[in-house]
Amino acid sequence: MERVAIIGVGQTKYERQKTEDSFADLVYEATTKAMADAEITIEEIDNVVTISNDFWDGRTISSMAVMDAAGAANKNASTVEGDGTFGALYGLMRILSGSYRTTLVVAHSKSSMGSLPIITNSMFDPIYYRSVGLDGISSAGLQARRYMDKYLVTEEDCALVSIKNHHNAKANPYAQLATELTVEDVMSSRALAEPIKLWDASPISDGAAAIILACENRAKKSAKKPAWVKGVGYCADAYYLGDRDLAEMDALSTAAKKAYSMAGITEPFKEIDVVELYDAFSYQELMWMEGLGFCDRGKAAKLVQEGVTQRQGSLAVNPSGGVLSAHPVLTAGLARLAETALQLRGEAEERQVEGAKTALAHGMNGSCGQGHCVWVLSQ
């Protein structure tokens, strides 16, 4: 595979409600920041991939509202309706096709403008599932309970994830929820969908992120140290929840194995320094760590308890604060890629993991982690 790298990143600050910013404002801010970071002009961008969704934006053909703000005029442009890591994958494939040297990938979210229960209810089967009121949170509650019962994970174990990530967010200027918590704080917070409580769940967030991908020849001319793409894998599981064991994550394991094989990774726990994964809920960080092959099933909680996943630990997980600290839907996965690129460049400021040379970014689509996309990057 021809080498491709991330040469520029840009993010807005993630907030509960950006009332003064339109979709286009957010996209323009992230796009111009990414170009400034890469020291590149819009004329040097060969094509643009935007990431948007009609349901979340509340309009049809939602991508058309942001194309100009992304600098897509007179360029080959397309859109992906899904998590930002999948949009970046499409951008990567465009470069690998040999037709383009650079690709701008930008995602935006104004989740505050919609109703999360109504929008996430619409992702379920209209005949059997929607009528019972399933949504993103209640379905996650089913998965959390199944996982915790099967692998003897406690609510207190999940609370430690929330404590770690909200603490990490204090070093991230883009984070929305940065605070110090205790187990008691998490356990006593308002119930959302048993066993998930308020501090186990990610917030509603507005914001945007962008990355610039470049082929090897162009990346070597970059003003900043490139974050090289070493491997990518993606996989989707069955649509119906009843067709899956929700405590298992075959799709994630498959995606990770593909990415590891491409990157030449044989022992992910030993070879990867920093991980940015999509922890929409506290229990998911534990599940996804296991699905990514960092430990055996049911053992991730012990790694958190022992401090292994802290920024100063042997495997830093979500040093940015993760999605628990800010959850701009569609944008969250692209933010994970941006954060890993900053880590590999040594430019993550107070959240920098010392000696980070190899990083993993993870995104997901669908209910209960139906689809996953895994990226391995290195210096």
Image: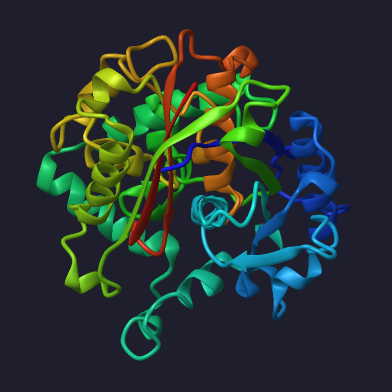
Query: What's the residue at 38%, 26% (across, down)?
Result: 183
The correct choice, above or below, for 318 with respect to 214 in the image is above
Kindly tell me whether residue 261 is visible in this rendering: yes
Residue 142 coordinates in the image, percent (x, y): 27, 60
What is the quadrant of residue 137 in the picture?
bottom left
Instruction: Using the rendered view, name the quadrant where residue 375 is placed.
Output: top left
Q: Nearer the viewer, residue 112 or 123?
A: 123
Rendered view: 145 above or below 15 = below
Residue 105 position, x and y percent, is 65, 51
Residue visible at 55% across and 72% down in the picture? 119
* Image quadrant where one finds the N terminus: top left
Q: Is residue 370 left or right of residue 44?
A: left
From this viewpoint, is residue 321 visible? no
Q: Nearer the viewer, residue 216 or 279?
A: 216
Is 58 left, or right, of 73 in this rendering? left
* Count of picture labels: 0
Residue at 32% in and 13% down: 314
Q: Is residue 110 above or below residue 33?
A: below
Give the quadrant of residue 33. top right
* Residue 17: image location, x then y, percent: 75, 51
Residue at the extreme bottom of the image, as rendered? 127
